[in-house]
Image (tube, rainbow, N blue to C red):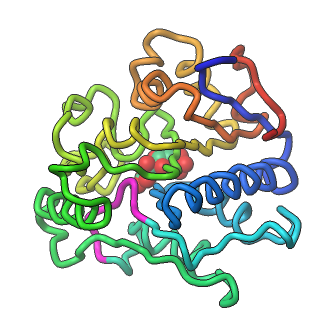
Amino acid sequence: MGKQPNLYSFENVDTQLAPNLRKYILERQSEAFDRHGVFRIATSGGSLPKTLAKALLDPASGSSQDKFEFGRWEVFYADERCVPLDHDDSNHKLVKAEWIDKIPAELGQPKVFTINEKLIDDPQEMADEYEKTLVSVFASRDSVKLPLFDLILLGCGPDGHTCSLFPEHPLLRETDAWVLSIKDSPKPPPGRITLSLPVVLHGANIAFVATGGGKKEILKQIFETEAGAKLPCGLVNNGAGERVSWFCDTAATEGVGYPRRSSVI
Ligand SMILES: O=C(O)[C@H](O)[C@@H](O)[C@H](O)[C@H](O)COP(=O)(O)O
């Protein structure tokens, strides 16, 4: 398939998608440790954290020799809602409840970079501060043009959005800032911060997780139409090519003509 994104499609999420996603993430972890001794990931919210939890923590998903070393992970948010960290709309609250809080002590604890909840009324200020956090971790903006995440884990909205980058929104044209704010998100809540498209495209690896029949129409558009290629998910596919992998179930890929793979090699 050359420089094209990989589209993996599995009959079953628990017994097939999760173990394959586990294998994929273990490989990315090992590459990252070789690269710089830590594994830097960014994650979205939505339905992703629940599926991710199955890949990361369900013993049925892999052999005991293959271990995640969470103590060497740094976890960032690809997008976050401007709400307190204990609010039901918080992506951090969801991610924490789904897997971070469930990590067995012997596997270590990741370092998690949350938003500053004191800034929830000022999304731009929050985005600027989160960008400063990235700058402090990924070195100065002067020397590093874009932060290099080892893995960016994303969802795909029914309208083709990803992170909090929505179709035809002016934020898609932002080329300077690493972290952007949005006050008019079509998906509630309206105030959010998000990684910019150039930061997402720069990721060493980008994985989408999209499951269920509710995703099939948008996947057909993204993979098969010119209009779909211009949606945020399509822009990631086109901009990052073979660094992009989609982990889907057959309900989501039904009718998609693009070549599908059934296991991570
Ligand atoms: O804050 C959010 O809403 C998410 O981070 C968002 O980017 C999500 O990943 C997509 O909307 C897909 O969500 P679903 O997987 O629930 O459809």
- Is residue 78 a member of the stretch shown in magenta? yes
Q: Is residue 128 left or right of residue 49?
A: left
- Position of 199 with respect to 53 (left or right) is left
Front-most of residues 208 and 178: 178
Q: Name the foreground residue: 205 vs 45.
A: 205
**Toward which corner of the image does residue 60 lie, by quadrant?**
bottom right
**On screen, residue 161 above or below 178:** above
User: Which x, y percent locates residue 125?
Assistant: 11, 62
Pinpoint residue 138: horizontal percent, then vertical percent. 31, 59
Q: Quadrant of residue 63?
A: bottom right
For the N terminus, the quadrant is: top right
Residue at x 46% of width, y 67% of height:
75
Along the line of sight, the residue nearer the viewer: 102 or 71: 71
- Which residue is pictured at 60% across the width and 26% down the height? 5
Seen in the picture, residue 157 relative to 66 is either above or below; the reply is: above
Is 150 colored magenta in this rendering? no
**Residue pushed farthest top?**
226
How many dots with numbers? 0
Q: Which residues are magenta?
A: 76-84
Seen in the picture, residue 163 relative to 136 is either above or below; the reply is above
Task: Please report the residue visible at 66 percent of the width from the left and 29 percent of the height from the top.
Answer: 6
Residue 182 location in percent, x, y?
21, 48
Please provide percent x and percent y for residue 123: 16, 59
Determine the residue positioned at 45% across, 74% down: 93
Residue 82 falls left or right of residue 53: left
